Image (spheres, rainbow, N blue to C red):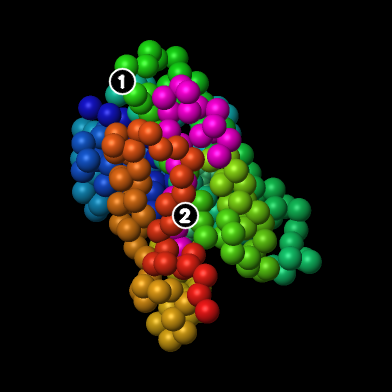
Amino acid sequence: MKTAMITGASRGIGLAIAARLQQDGCNVAILDLAEESAAEANMNAAGLEKQRRLYLRGDVTRQDCRDAFLQQTVERFGEVNILVNNAGVAPRVRADLLDMSEESFDFVLGVNVKGNLGMSQTVARHMLARPLTGRRRGVIVNVSSCSAYATSTNRGEYCVSKAGVSMLTQLFADRLAEEGVNVFEVRPGIIATDMTAGVKEKYDDLILNKGILPIRRWGTPEDVAGAVSLLCDERLCYCTGDVLNVDGGFHIQRL
Ligand SMILES: NC(=O)c1ccc[n+]([C@@H]2O[C@H](COP(=O)([O-])OP(=O)(O)OC[C@H]3O[C@@H](n4cnc5c(N)ncnc54)[C@H](O)[C@@H]3O)[C@@H](O)[C@H]2O)c1
């Protein structure tokens, strides 16, 4: 049985990914900042089986948390086959690019880029310490965003961070290609979660009235989870560094 480590999975997209990968037959281990009681309630509601899940409350920006996450996962399930770098934050305040604070830049880049980098380093070292049998040692999936290429001048630090996640995907895909670890990027568009709850009216208008998305509906966490599940399939073992847009066609340039 395979084991997947997923960051930021106490709710939203990460939780849906954890549920999907468990349905695919994986044990799942989750690292998240959320209180254990809240996370447990969400995991139960999502149908995550207790016997095949582990929850650790911790911060992806801290190396001691990343190490503890790996150690506890290996102690419980034996080895790690899949890492999904999903934890991410938007700026606490949307400020114009000219007013973006250094603190906000550090906060967003810290979670979205440094946390992603540190998790990939930590888990890749573990994967490489095991012998390669077959074609694949493991898979790393990074959850970026359409903001990796689409500008929002009132949350520039988020856009910069997601462009950084795209480059991390390319870097790790290149470095780990010969080691049997495939690295992919999932690029969600506009997905209905707590992260977008505060801007629901704005996106309702853009999606339903203005037709900003070729597929005229909000994305769901399950839409993203399905894409992650596909990328973890061994049939993609000759692919690495690819981007899968999960955005209702938002990335298509239209006239
Ligand atoms: N919702 C969208 O429209 C959308 C679109 C594109 C990309 N994304 C990306 O998808 C990912 C998940 O987003 P979501 O919409 O589910 O957001 P969310 O806010 O609902 O969930 C994010 C989770 O990450 C956790 N987290 C935050 N900081 C953390 C840290 N330092 N250490 C550990 N866990 C931490 C939070 O506690 C939360 O459970 C993020 O990377 C986000 O940038 C979301």
Residue 106 percent location from the top left of the image? 69, 48
Left or right of 58, for residue 37 = left
Few, some or many C-alpha atoms within 10 Å of disc 1 (few <14, some 14-19, many ≥20)?
few
In the displayed orientation, state which residue is furthest to the right. 98
Residue 172 on the magenta segment: yes
> Residue 84's x, y, as percent?
42, 40
Snapshot quadrant of residue 246: bottom left
Query: Which of labels 1 and 2 is toward the front?
Result: 1
The quarter of the displayed image where residue 138 is located? top left
Q: Which residues fall within the magenta stretch?
A: 170-189
**Helix, strand or loop under label 1:** loop
Q: Examine the rendering and report whether any part of residue 176 can be seen.
A: yes
Query: Which residue is painted at 37% across and 76% down in the image?
Result: 216
Check disc 2 and give the amino acid type. Arg
Query: In the depicted view, which residue is nearer to us: 173 or 217?
Result: 173
Q: Which residue is mark 2?
A: 187
Q: Residue at x 43, y 28 (%)?
A: 181
Amino acid type shown at disc 1 = Gly
Local SS, label 2: strand
Residue 134: assigned label: 1
Crowdedness near tag 2: few (<14), some (14–19) or many (≥20) residues, C-alpha within 10 Å: many
